Image (spheres, grey):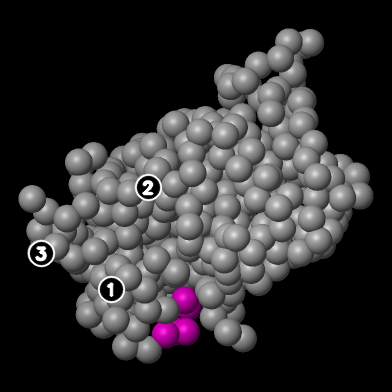
Amino acid sequence: MSKKADLIVGLQWGDEGKGKIVDHMAQTHDYVCRFAGGHNAGHTIVVGDKKYALHLIPSGILNPKGKNIVGNGVVLSPVDFIKEMSQFDNLEDRLFISDKAHMLLPYHALIDQARERMKGDKAIGTTGKGIGPAYGDKIARVGHRMGELHDTEKLATKIVDFFEVNRAIFEVMGVPIPVKDELKVELDGYAKVLAPYIVDTTQLIWRVLDDDKRVLLEGAQGTMLDIDHGTYPYVTSSTTVSAGACAGLGLNPKDLGKVTGIAKAYCTRVGNGPFPSEDFGEDGELLRKNGHEFGTTTGRPRRCGWFDAVAMRHAVRVNGVDQVALMKLDVLDGFPEIKVCVAYEIEGKEIDYVPYDLEEATAVYKTFKGWDKTEGCRVFDELPQTAKDYIEALEEMIGTKMGIISTSPDREDTIIR
Ligand code: GDP
Ligand code: IMO
Ligand code: MG
């Protein structure tokens, strides 16, 4: 029987701290694989006084012996990928890109931004990177896969033909029609750098698992941003939940091993859409300040609020979470009281599940006593009693053990229970 792949997924609205835990676990895994999303993701890793922000390259890259796969479920911007590669040496033989991953080209970003402008106050608040249009083209079967970089003449012709057919739409959106020769030069530039890395990653990951290697699957975004299970239409365009790991890499459900769900000890969201436990007052400000809650990808201030146990139960079930990693506990240090959303109220009625539409939901809270300091703590028993009480109450509410607790951005400040 082949080895099973361990999985890491975000349980909230993204930015839970996945990068830190992937990097931590990558030290004991041979391969780290991204399966969804694009460079809308921003995964931060802090090692000593060095800080890395990864968008497309898997967070296993900081493990010098580790190998990294970008799966077919990812939408890959060649220009951004090449920029990101330049931070690292010796990538050959430790970075592999699926030939089936869809290409995100600069026009996708222009379309994304034009659509957001046209939506006005109904805008999703996307990262503007072109994620929706790239996945849209994939599903509409007019996208282009990384394998097509092997014949840039043919690819350039296909892209220009597509623009010709849809000329009127692109003109309304202000997206320039590419000139074939210029486009070919651009694509040749991508092909020159990326061709050595483009392989059949489905065969590769099967082989790796059959050889009993340890594989870690790195989710991007979070459950509440999932295209089906999040707060549609204020979501991203990919399957961010566990199931996406199978389709996004060519695995079957039996290939999946332990699922670690990542959640902050409070909650944030960047972009628009419902967020029942958002705090618009001083506490929300303080969470933003103490947690440095500004987007890794766009620099936008993140909206802040309290841990949402209802959304978390939904996320635990949909992802099949075995253990939760509770992140940024230290950000709650010094709060005299800490709130947790334990139910939603909609039109005067209390519910304990995530409904079809969260727009009208307000949070029903339970309040916990705060603590002085958890920052830098590495042993569970050394946490203040009220912090332990908080964690144990959350475990009870979501029915899952919190096997990892994080108390600072640093790789080492991590409690393993
Ligand atoms: P990701 O997208 O899920 O990988 O998360 P981001 O990297 O976008 O955002 C998480 C931020 O929190 C990063 O700046 C991390 O360095 C930081 N971080 C992670 N864990 C902790 C923690 O336990 N405490 C504090 N204070 N910061 C943390
Ligand atoms: P990581 O992997 C937080 C949000 C955007 C917007 C919505 C749609 O770092 O957790 P998109 O550009 O994907 O079409 O935008 O999704 N979003 C994220 N929010 N963390 C992310 O990734 C995100 N990726 C997308 O802010 O609300
Ligand atoms: Mg992030």
* 335, 213: nearer the viewer: 335
Q: Of circles 1 and 2, which is in front?
A: 2
Instruction: Residue under label 3, please give it.
Output: 211
Above/below status of 145 relative to 224: below
**Where does the image place residue 254, in percent across and percent down from the top left?**
20, 41
Could you give the CA–CA distance between mark 2 and mark 3, rounded to whole angstroms? 21 Å
* Residue 316 makes an appearance in the image: yes
Label located before the other in sequence (1 or 2) = 1
Q: Residue at x 84, y 53 (%)?
A: 335
Could you give the CA–CA distance between mark 1 and mark 2, rounded to whole angstroms? 20 Å
* Residue 275 makes an appearance in the image: no
The numbered mark at residue 259 is 2
Q: Is residue 404 left or right of residue 382?
A: left
The numbered mark at residue 67 is 1
Instruction: Say what secondary structure mark 2 lies in.
Output: strand
The region drawn magenta spans 83-88
Please tell me whether residue 79 belongs to the stretch shown in magenta: no
**Where does the image place residue 58, in percent across and percent down from the top left?**
40, 67
Image quadrant where residue 365 sits? top right
Tell me the crowding category of disc 2: few under 14, some 14 to 19, or many 20 or more residues within 10 angstroms, Cα based.
many
Image quadrant where residue 364 sits? top right
* The CB of the residue at mark 2 lies under 8 Å from ligand 1: no
> Three-letter amino acid code at disc 1?
Lys
